[in-house]
Image (cartoon, rainbow, N blue to C red):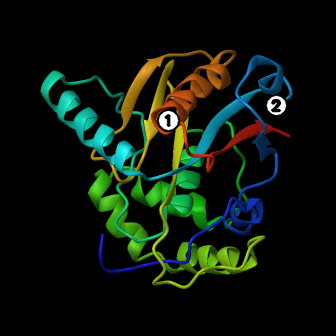
Amino acid sequence: MEGQRWLPLEANPDFLRQLGLQPTWQFGDVYGLDAELLSMVPRPVCAVLLLFPVTEKYESFRLEEEAKIKQQGQEVSPEVYFMRQTIGNACGTIGLIHAVANNQGRLEFESDSALKKFLIESSSLSPEEKATFLERDESIRVTHESSAQEGQTEAPSLDEKVDLHFIAFVNVGGHLYELDGRKPFPIVHRKTTEESFLEDAAEVCKKFMARDPEELRFTVVALSKA
């Protein structure tokens, strides 16, 4: 993933607003994955983002998972919008794009939205072509950079290695998908419904945490109806 690098992006809700998404749905923190804390999250939820550390244990699991799926196969709906990540530190933006792109029927955009324009123009491209298209999209890059600079903590330099990674979970056609631009394809986890989606996504997040029990650097946010 050499080549372009962006500043790491924190979960900055202003980023989506600057790209022309109306605030009818908003991201909020999920403070825990047990039933009581999940019950505090506003519903409905249409996407979940997970920030997690990329450790040796995770990388080992990722390669095993990829080999297993390539061998056994999986059925992915053509309705799923998925893109690869070729830009360093762009996983936050790609996670947000995955969350929004797979919920366009629910979300509302400004008429001049740069993000809506990007989604329309890239919808028919392959995951690799979408990645190249993002590399060339100045409006999203500039908005990403300004949002990264405005984050709550001091932004690291472009060259600093960041070992935290954002991925998205969405419900497309009644199936829970994990969308991670570092992987060659979406991961189909299980059947889900609008009502059970947050709990189903939380179960997958728990597996990430169980793989690295010594790690504390996990953050979960949900895109909920405002």
Residue 163 is situated, as x and y percent measured from the top left of the image, at 47, 62
Residue 194 is situated, as x and y percent measured from the top left of the image, at 65, 19
Quadrant where the image shows the N terminus: bottom left
- On screen, residue 80 above or below 43: below
Q: What is the three-letter code of the residue carrying label 2?
A: Val
Horizontal side of residue 77 vs 191, given as left or right: left
Q: What is the three-letter code of the residue carrying label 1?
A: Phe
Mark 1 crowd level (few <14, some 14–19, many ≥20, 10 Å Cα): some
Horizontal side of residue 51 vs 77, given as left or right: right
The front one of 69 and 37 is 37
- On screen, residue 85 above or below 226: below
Specify the quadrant of the image occupied by residue 186: top left
Specify the quadrant of the image occupied by residue 156: bottom right
Q: Which residue is mark 2?
A: 41
The front one of 128 and 65 is 65
The front one of 10 and 226 is 10
